[in-house]
Amino acid sequence: MALPPGAATSSCRFAIFSSMLVLFCMSCHAQLSSTFYDESCPDALATIRTSIRTAVSRERRMAASLIRLHFHDCFVQGCDASILLENSDSISSERDAPPNNGSVRGYEVIDDAKSQVEKICPGVMSCADIVAVAARDASVAVSGPSWTVKLGRRDSTTASPSLASSDLPSFLDGLNKLVSRFASKGLSARDMVALSGAHTLGQAQCFTFRNRIYSNGNNIDAGFASTRKRRCPASGSDATLAPLDLVTPNSFDNNYFKNLMQKKGLLESDQVLFSGGSTDSIVSEYSKTPASFKSDFAAAMVKMGNISPLTGSSGQIRKICSALN
Ligand code: HEM
């Protein structure tokens, strides 16, 4: 049957209009804004800053731990504070999943910041936003870059230990695996290399780098391997710590990339970023130009902070970060 003249164009216009509407609605729901709490809690950011500064001056490693906490939150169900929930009748926690258990730190620092914010503005600011702001303030506290944190995330009512196990990268991952893991979260290989530069800070346990230092492979500096073996025997001492950046583990700089170029990356997943593959040129760029590392790191943290936030009326604003309301 022939269509009346004009019918095809008008249905076509309708289809274009509806898809634009859908796209617009998707983006308006997912939109975070740096001014989100300007009216509802104008002192929230200053309160968090004080709290994080105090925690980092008490223990410098806490800066590393808080940056990592945000990463492990965002890669599992999005940046929704799901990592903070403790086991309960309705929650099987991400905290106990293998990539986090006995490894992720900083929960009590976030609890403390949250309770300070609750004192001035009860029920207003989400735990997910506090984690995102804490990561930025932690970076600043150890002379790392700053960035404007977009806000308005809400807190999940669920947690997923199985997604924590499947979606977080492993220290044994090869380059292709790492690139595809980050790609599946909307992050490029360049973002991945910049974000891995967070390993300029903090510590790793012996069991995470044992295979690498005993591999006798040719992508590890022999002197570095023997130094690390002293405190990380072939078996036992699994939890003994070593710095991810052997030069300056407490300050945010580009030594991590210089280490990689000397085959002194601690984890297998660090060294694969400079081992003859597609990311070598990025590592070498960051090792020469600290400013480009810092600005790419800041931009990639903003991008990571945008992973699948709950907004609008999804989720909740938890009163206590470790439990549902
Ligand atoms: C590229 C894939 C990555 C892998 C395979 C990986 C793996 C690891 C491992 C195994 C540790 C040591 C944990 C332990 O021994 O308890 C660690 C520590 C750390 N990671 Fe990563 N990581 C990756 C990316 C990132 C990213 C994207 C960030 C942040 C933007 C980050 C931040 C940190 C920090 C700061 C530490 C030290 C934490 C502390 O001292 O408490 N990592 N990572």
Image: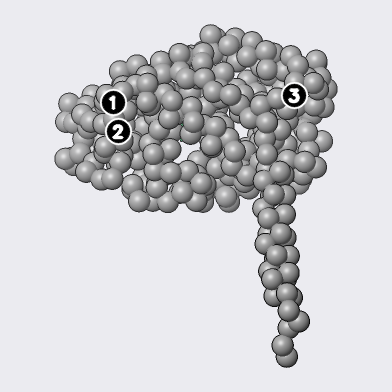
Name the element at disc 3: loop
- Percent position of residue 229, x then y: 26, 29
Q: Residues within 10 Å of mark 3 (few under 14, many from 20)?
A: some
**In the rendered view, would you say 121 is above or below 269?**
above
Name the element at disc 1: helix
From the viewer's perspective, tell me whether residue 289 is left or right of residue 38.
left
Residue position for label 3 = 37
How far is mark 3 from mark 2, CA to CA? 37 Å
- The image quarter containing residue 249 is top left
- Percent position of residue 81, x then y: 66, 36
Q: Residue at x 37, y 21 (%)?
A: 291
Residue position for label 1 = 287
The three-letter code of the residue at mark 1 reads Ser
Residue position for label 2 = 283
Along the polypeptide, which appears first: circle 3 or circle 1? 3
How far is mark 1 from mark 2, CA to CA? 6 Å
**In the rendered view, would you say 287 is above or below 272?**
above
Along the polypeptide, which appears first: circle 3 or circle 2? 3
Depth check: 23 or 47 in front? Answer: 23
Answer whether labels 1 and 2 touch (C-beta < 8 Å): yes
- Percent position of residue 53, x then y: 58, 11
Q: Residues within 10 Å of mark 1 (few under 14, many from 20)?
A: many
